[in-house]
Image: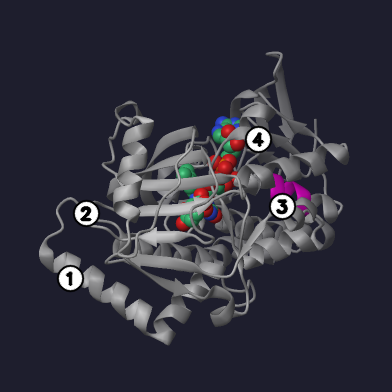
Amino acid sequence: MRTRVGIVGAGPAGLMLAHLLRLAGIDSVVLERRSREYVEKRVRAGVLEHPTVELLRETGAGERLDREGLPHHGFALRFDGVDHRVDLSGLTGHPITVYGQQEVVKDLIALRLAAGEPLLFDVSDVALHDLTTDAPRITWRGADGTAQELTCDVVAGCDGFHGVARQSIPQSVLTIFERAYPFAWLGVLARTAPSADELIYTYHERGFALHSMRSPEITRLYLQVPPEEDIADWSDARIWDELSARLATRDGFTLTSGPILDKGVTPMRSFVAEPLRHGRLFLAGDAAHIVPPTGAKGMNLAIADVRLLARAVEEFVRNKDERLLDSYSADCLKRVWRAEHFSWWMTSMLHLAPDADPFDRRLQLAQLRYTAASDPARTSLAENYVGLAYERL
Ligand code: FAD
Ligand code: DHB
């Protein structure tokens, strides 16, 4: 088989890249290790930046998002038992949109299949070859176990942090920048109405907690826990008790509980592999970089990467012009490092490190109080949270 662009991974990065390339009239094949059902049910991100929403809309992938997504014009920073609202729309002119990552994935899969374009699920043994030639190849086993091969002009590694693409690059080529955090997030999805209209990021002496949502009937909540925490140690009752303790306010906030539909523990790390290119292999999304979830940047960065990659591939295919491919890595890394800094900053301000001493806590509270009290500080937080316009970074 031959195609222009072989895409490994059908997460937000791979599916959006395939979508943008199709609109540009460029053939691609998407290979995904998991089943369609699995990727459509995987509960992950929930916050879309304004530029992400605009891009989905402009490219015809925003119809259900516009109907079912929840525009949020602000969120609360909760500390000392009091809320301090960050007025996103007032400060930046734009809201964020709460819409589950798996809903974006479902929408992009539906568009791809409706267009009759190749998207292969349940593949195994994906391997990349001849990456430094102008005809790189991908081999794999199809769902029925038969050996397959694809020759491409470009391979896009959109296969997430544990995928095969980054591992196919010789170690000597990549520089890794990394930070581990001494905590993780325990996330739950519950069938109960949100207990507030907006997201609440809570700093508490028992640890960070986040109140979010997916719909008027479904609440999404997170608790800071130790990194090696076993989810089996967290009964539903213990989860609700801990959330209630951390989210308590001086004026008697009540958290509504309900049946827990999904729960899991996610480790937190910052990670960047530079450059995002080796020969004709280009990395995008979590395959190249990870941010801790505080601030909700991961999926948005994946979409921003492939926006640039699609343009670069288009110039290359249409005009034989490789300049955008050559600058792809450096162009992406500007936004990536902005998000790395923002996510690290939000994480450091809101979480309690196990070795934190009273000095560290005073510094966190000083930063929170300043952010709550100062228009410039709140504006800086808001513009990063809502997402800088693509032209600016
Ligand atoms: P992925 O979504 O990981 O997709 C990669 C795909 O490649 C997967 O489908 C995988 O099965 C497939 N794959 C892997 N290996 C292979 C292989 N060898 N062959 C073929 N296919 C393969 N981000 C936000 O923007 N906002 C948020 O609110 C937010 N909250 C989060 C909350 C949690 C609890 C977690 C875990 C993450 C959150 N994120 C958030 C991060 C976000 O989910 C990721 O950044 C996003 O999924 C990255 O998309 P991707 O397409 O690069 O990678
Ligand atoms: C959600 C996840 C985040 O990482 C965040 O900062 C806000 C909301 C969510 O899943 O709803």
Determine which residue is flagged by label 4: 40
Task: Please say whether residue 41 is visible from this viewpoint.
Answer: yes
Q: Of marks 1 and 2, which one's residue comes earlier in the chain?
A: 2
Dot 1 falls on a residue whose secondary structure is helix
Q: Of marks 1 and 4, which one's residue comes earlier in the chain?
A: 4
Q: Of marks 4 and 3, which one's residue comes earlier in the chain?
A: 4
Q: Of marks 2 and 4, which one's residue comes earlier in the chain?
A: 4
In which quadrant will I find the N terminus? top right
Q: Amino acid at mark 4?
A: Glu
Instruction: Give the mark toward the camera: 4 or 3.
Output: 3
Which mark is on residue 60?
A: none
Residue at 50% across / 71% down in the picture?
384
The residue at label 1 has a CB less than 8 Å from ligand 2: no
Above or below 138: residue 355: below
Instruction: Give the mark toward the camera: 3 or 2.
Output: 3
- Residue 243, image x, y percentages: 35, 47
Residue at 88% across / 36% down in the picture?
116
Determine which residue is flagged by label 2: 353
**Could you say which is closer to the camera, residue 240 or residue 289?**
240
| Mark 2 vs 4: CB contact within 8 A | no
Determine which residue is flagged by label 3: 68
Q: Of marks 3 and 2, which one's residue comes earlier in the chain?
A: 3
